[in-house]
Image (cartoon, helix red, strand yellow):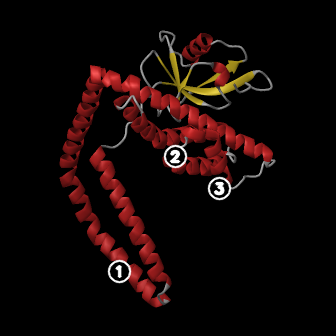
Amino acid sequence: KYLVSMSGKTRVFVSLNGDYEGSPAIVVVKDGMTFEQFLAKCSDKLKLPEKKFTRCFYISNAAEVDDPDDLMPDDKLFVSEGEDFKKKATEGMLSSGLNAIASGTSYVYSKTTDFAKSQMSEETRKKFEDAEAKAAESLAPIVDKIKETTAPAVEWTDKKLEVAADTVTEKKKEFMASETGQYLQNKVYAPAAEKSKELFAITCTELEKMGEKSKGSMVSAQEYMKNVKEKMGKEWDEKYAPAVKQMYEQAKEKGKQTGEALKEQTEKLKKNWNEQVEPVLREKMAALNTNPAK
């Protein structure tokens, strides 16, 4: 666990779950404070005495906090009365996709014309920019009209996609509650997740050992890979290689960060590892349960 501070106090910023726009309350966490005392103080500082908070989350990554000793200065937190972390409202699937395409197209056009302009004489460049300005001025009303006309259709499609996504989520829950789903959870998913944690711990330990051995300087990726393979032994699978390489690269960035940025990078590192390694382990677990003799 992290030390609270030299003075035995840590200042954090707390908001009601889902309140991304309001001003957070400043809460000072004292050394030795219990989780219940911390939540009660949050209720007091937020001026919500009627609220009985039972859960706390880091806003940056939605990870749950269960011990005030884990908090670091200036952490930004949500507290709730038991409900899960509330994500920030985002654009609909279609509208966000269209905006991404528009932004990408604009970026490509900008980069292409910037290069073209750099090859033009000053006089030609000025004529080109004047033409661009006139075109933009003429097209602006047309673009606005298109947006106005298509907005209802885009909004309707977004709502349909949201319903479809909710339906898929609900069906997944129903399946996982079934006998087959429970079998997969207990025999495939849970063991794969546990094994992924074990292998992740090995990669982290080897990185720390090599860092100490090289007195703070980064060893080569090849040497790190070799050590991880040797440490994993029979557990090693070449399919883990991309995850190990990415682990190495992210670890270099992690070493340059502190505070909340360090926490975020660590969580990202774990997330990326699990996304790449767990599917491989699930295949192994599924094959093992299908063919027990192996």
- Residue marked by disc 3: 222
**Which one is nearer the viewer's eye here, 87 or 146?**
87
Q: Could you tell me the amino acid type at mark 2? A: Tyr
Label 3 crowd (10 A; few <14 / some 14-19 / many >=20): few
* SS assignment at label 3: helix
* Left or right: 207 as drawn, with respect to 291: right
Cβ atoms at labels 2 and 3 below 8 Å apart:
no
The answer to whether residue 294 is above or below residue 43 is below
Percent x, y for residue 71? 65, 26
Q: Position of residue 234 (x, y in %)?
A: 56, 39
On screen, residue 235 above or below 114:
above
Residue drawn at (64%, 19%), measured in percent from left and top? 68
Q: CA distance from mark 3 to mark 1?
A: 54 Å
Of marks 3 and 1, which one's residue comes earlier in the chain?
Answer: 1
Q: Nearer the viewer, mark 3 or mark 1?
A: 3
Please state which amino acid type lies under the numbered disc 1: Ala
Q: Label for residue 240?
A: 2
- Residue pictured at 61% horizontal, 15% vertical: 38
- Indicate left or right for 22 with 40 as reference: left
Q: Residues within 10 Å of mark 2 (few under 14, many from 20)?
A: some
Q: Is residue 259 above or below residue 132?
A: above
Q: Under tag 1, what secondary structure?
A: helix
Image quadrant holding the N terminus, namely: top right
Q: Are marks 3 and 1 in contact (CB under 8 Å)?
A: no
First reached walking from the N terminus: tag 2 or tag 3: 3
- Earlier in the chain: of badge 1 and badge 2, it is 1
Residue 66 in percent (x, y) is at 57, 19
Callout 3 amino acid: Gln
Label drawn at residue 131? 1
Q: Residue at x 36, y 55 (%)?
A: 100
